[in-house]
Each structure stands twice: as structure tokens, then as C-alpha cells.
């Protein structure tokens, strides 16, 4: 059983990836695709620089908090949109099931 766990962990082995966020170097561990971590870090860096440019007197902690609030708002909006979409899919599924049932009966 130990060899099974060892092979499973080696296939999911994480590799270090160096990224720069707000002029600070970070070494992060990436799973299967290090480019994904690099792209996420780049997006975060762009967001932080955008906020820092608009709030030029803000320190890096304040910029980070504002970025977190921005990302939390985006997440909340996407979660709400996903819930609405699921409700619409459920409604359409019921409608189509009713139409199919009617077609099969008639």
C-alpha cells in the first residue's frame, strides 16, 4: 500500500515557481501546470498595480486589502450568477421534461 501512495504523490508533486507581485519576489508551489500559477500571479500583480496607481498614498497593506475586497466582490458576483444559471437550467429541464412527456402521450 505504501508504494501506491508514493506513486500517487509523485504524480502530483509540486514544483517551485518564482513570481513577482507588487515588486516582491515569491516562490510558490505549482501543481501540474506552472504557467497557471504564473498567470494568476500576473493577474494579481496587475490588479495591485492598478489599485496602487489610483490610491497613490496607500501603503502595500491597504492596497492588498482593497484587492482582496475587489476579488471577494467578483467571487460573490460569479457565485450569484452561477446560482441563477443553475435555477434557470432546472426550470428549463422541468419545462422540457413536461414537453417530452406531452409529446410521448399524444
Image (cartoon, rainbow, N blue to C red):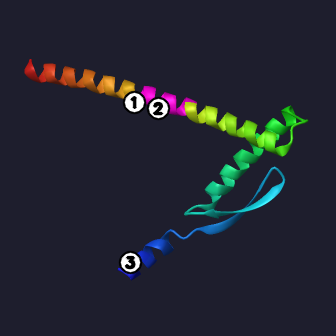
- Above or below, 97 relative to 32: above
> What range of the chain is rendered magenta?
77-86
Disc 3 to disc 2: CB gap under 8 Å? no
Residue 23's spot in the image, x, y percent?
84, 53
Find the residue positioned furthest to the bottom: 3
Q: Which mark is residue 86?
A: 1
Residue 6's spot in the image, x, y percent?
45, 78
Rounded to the nearest angstrom, the CA distance separating label 3 from label 2 is 38 Å
For the N terminus, give its image quadrant: bottom left
Residue 52's spot in the image, x, y percent?
84, 38
Disc 2 to disc 1: CB gap under 8 Å? yes
Rounded to the nearest angstrom, the CA distance separating label 1 from label 3 is 38 Å
61 or 30, which lies in front? 61
User: On the image, which quarter does residue 77 sit in?
Assistant: top right
- Above or below, 8 relative to 49: below
* Residue bearing the label numbered 3: 4
Q: Secondary structure at mark 2?
A: helix
Q: Which mark is residue 82?
A: 2
Amino acid at each position: 500500500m505504501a508504494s501506491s501512495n508514493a506513486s500517487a504523490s509523485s504524480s502530483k508533486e509540486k514544483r517551485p515557481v518564482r513570481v513577482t507581485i507588487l515588486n516582491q519576489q515569491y516562490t510558490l508551489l505549482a501543481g501540474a501546470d506552472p504557467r497557471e500559477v504564473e498567470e494568476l500571479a500576473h493577474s494579481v500583480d496587475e490588479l495591485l498595480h492598478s489599485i496602487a496607481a489610483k490610491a497613490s498614498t496607500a501603503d502595500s497593506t491597504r492596497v492588498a486589502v482593497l484587492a482582496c475586497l475587489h476579488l471577494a466582490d467578483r467571487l460573490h458576483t460569479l457565485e450569484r450568477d452561477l446560482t441563477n444559471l443553475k435555477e434557470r437550467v432546472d426550470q428549463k429541464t422541468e419545462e422540457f421534461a413536461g414537453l417530452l412527456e406531452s409529446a410521448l402521450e399524444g
